[in-house]
Amino acid sequence: MKNLYTLNRYIKKYTHLLLIGSIFILISNIFALYPAEYVKESFDTIENSLKKDNPNIKYELFVFGTLILFFALLKGIFMFFMRQTIIVMSRKIEFDLKNDIYKKYQFLNLFFYKKNNTGDLMNRITEDVSRVRMYLGPAIMYAINLIFLFSLVIWRMTSISPTLTTYVLIPLPILAITVYFVSHHINKNSEKVQIQLSNLTSISQESYSAINIIKTFQNEDNSYKMFFKSCKEYMQRQLKLVSIEAWFFPLIIFLIGISTITTIYIGGIESMKIGSNVTTGTIAEFIIYVNMLTWPVASVGWVTSIIQRAEASMQRINDFKKNNNIIPNTNLIKVKTIKDIKFENVSFKYKDTNIQALKNINFQIKKGKTLGVFGKTGSGKSTIANLICRLYDCDSGKILVNNNNIMDIKLSGIRSKIGYVQQDSFLFSGNIAENIAFGKDQLLYEKVYKCAETSSIHEEILSFQNKYFTLIGERGVQLSGGQKQRISIARAIYTDPEIFIFDDCLSAIDADQENKILKNIKNQTQDTSTVIISHRTSSIQHADEIIVLEKGSISCRGTHKELMESENFYSYMHKEQTKKNNLYL
Ligand SMILES: Nc1ncnc2c1ncn2[C@@H]1O[C@H](COP(=O)(O)OP(=O)(O)O)[C@@H](O)[C@H]1O
Ligand SMILES: [Mg+2]
């Protein structure tokens, strides 16, 4: 229960609902007692009329019948209110909890995301939260209901016949324990079903996404076999679950039957004793009480297993909430504009893989200037971009922004001034205009068109049937690599950044178009600085300074002209790349 205590904070917020709900439960239980009493009265009236003629019997029975209906109706109304308060409370807490978890997800750093797979992360917010909700809603409601009902019914029963009460209650603990074991078994097996279902879902999801590859490799049969196997396993697990569930009702009905027989038998013996107040009506009343108690008692077992599952889920949620993989954002120096960014002896190692991605890196990005970062794949280029945006923090050395340590500057202040176009940019499902305006709260169409013009994609968007309203993503248009890259560039331009970082994002665009885009950007915003990361010399040859990365270290630097004057990796690659291009001409 330790973990479930953390929910108190949420419950406190809705204490009024819990209190009002409890009052409704109490009232509905009080009304539930009356019908049993009137059944007793009806039975006794019938019995007495058999002994002595009663001309009013029809009228009396009609009155009892009406009263029974009336109280049953009142009980029903308050049961409705009880669900409307307690279940509503559980749904509201579920909403808060989901939002809290999602908010936390947004602040965790990339190491966290690498350690946990997407399925697990999704489970926290869906499965785990809904199990906790089962505790907050049905479990709490049934527990309170049981307490009130039990107290009222037992009080009523003992006031009539303590002996009969004792005998009648004997089978109930057995019922609670049996239900606990059966529902524990059901839960365990339904978890197995769930696991298999998510396996089945991911198999089918993967095969839909990779349908092109499956077809070209003629892998349809294998793919089907895999699905079949997984589906068969799913069916077998379901069948096992069905066979356990099939035990549930017969067992309960059997135990209720035993209680009823005990009531009639012991009640019969008691009624025959001289001076006893047990009548035929009492036996009927007790049978109704037994029936009223069986479901709530059965729910003890069910509620216990819900609480156990909720406790395990809450533990996972709490462990996740304790996670401190967060980029610190404490000392909040605000920067109005970024004048320059300096790397001083910066080194960085990816802790999870132990790869030393950068070693003693020094460079400066000056306002309005262009820095080219050149190197082979894996040389550490993207890592530099990640460090500038503080997706990671460096291990040693310093990154200075206007001579302040980047760690001391408000995170949002830095990121909002950087237009980072990543290597594999992701476009969200939604239309093109929404994707371009992603970085700002407002969608201004004129601005969207202008950004698309700057990134040389406007004409192409207009050629689509729905123009800027064309949907991207699963059910939308299939964009080419180059189109995706240019929309991503437009998305970065839309945020009016002070620094652009283009991480190999011009690779699917031909050199002419690439130069046009870069020129457009320069013409529009004189003061913006640009970092162009590329493995193509043609992309960066006009940069004010080029740094050449080899295995995480800078092997040489200078302008294109300076670098071409000596023998180095850059000049070698430039000659190789231009030679290749010439071959195609
Ligand atoms: N998220 C990551 N986790 C662990 N290692 C990484 C990660 N990203 C890159 N690396 C490793 O760090 C090195 C530098 O990678 P990266 O900066 O992406 O190079 P580039 O952009 O030049 O291709 C590579 O050896 C790569 O395998
Ligand atoms: Mg890269």
Image: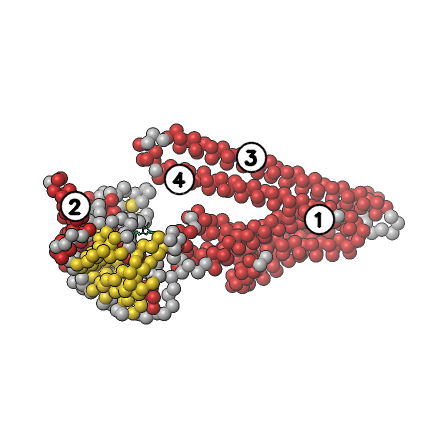
Q: Nearer the viewer, residue 26 or 225?
A: 225
Q: Which residue is mark 1?
A: 173
- Picture coordinates of residue 583, whole percent (x, y): 12, 40
Q: Which residue is mark 3?
A: 239
Gap between marks 3 and 4 measured at Cα: 24 Å
Q: Is residue 220 above or below residue 307?
A: above
Crowding at dot 1, Cα within 10 Å, few <14 / some 14-19 / many 20+, comes out as: some
Q: Seen in the image, is 108 located left or right of residue 90?
A: left
Regarding residue 106, the answer to whether it shows in the image is: no
Q: Nearer the viewer, residue 435 or 538?
A: 538
Instruction: Give whichever of discs 2 and 4 has the lower sequence position.
Output: 4
Q: Looking at the image, which residue sits at the far right?
A: 274
Gap between marks 2 and 4 measured at Cα: 40 Å
Instruction: Give whichever of discs 3 and 4 has the lower sequence position.
Output: 4
Secondary structure, mark 2, is helix
- Picture coordinates of residue 86, whole percent (x, y): 56, 56
Gap between marks 1 and 2 measured at Cα: 83 Å
Residue at position x 61%, y 38% in the image? 244
Instruction: Give whichever of discs 4 and 1 has the lower sequence position.
Output: 1
Gap between marks 3 and 1 measured at Cα: 29 Å
Q: What type is the residue that disc 4 sits on?
A: Gln
Q: Seen in the image, is 85 located left or right of residue 400?
A: right
Instruction: Give whichever of discs 1 and 2 has the lower sequence position.
Output: 1
Regarding residue 324, the answer to whether it shows in the image is: yes
Crowding at dot 4, Cα within 10 Å, few <14 / some 14-19 / many 20+, comes out as: few
Q: Which residue is mark 4?
A: 205
Residue at position x 12%, y 42% in the image? 582
Instruction: Give whichever of discs 3 and 1 has the lower sequence position.
Output: 1
Q: Which residue is mark 2?
A: 577
The reply to whether callout 3 and callout 4 are in contact (CB within 8 Å) is no
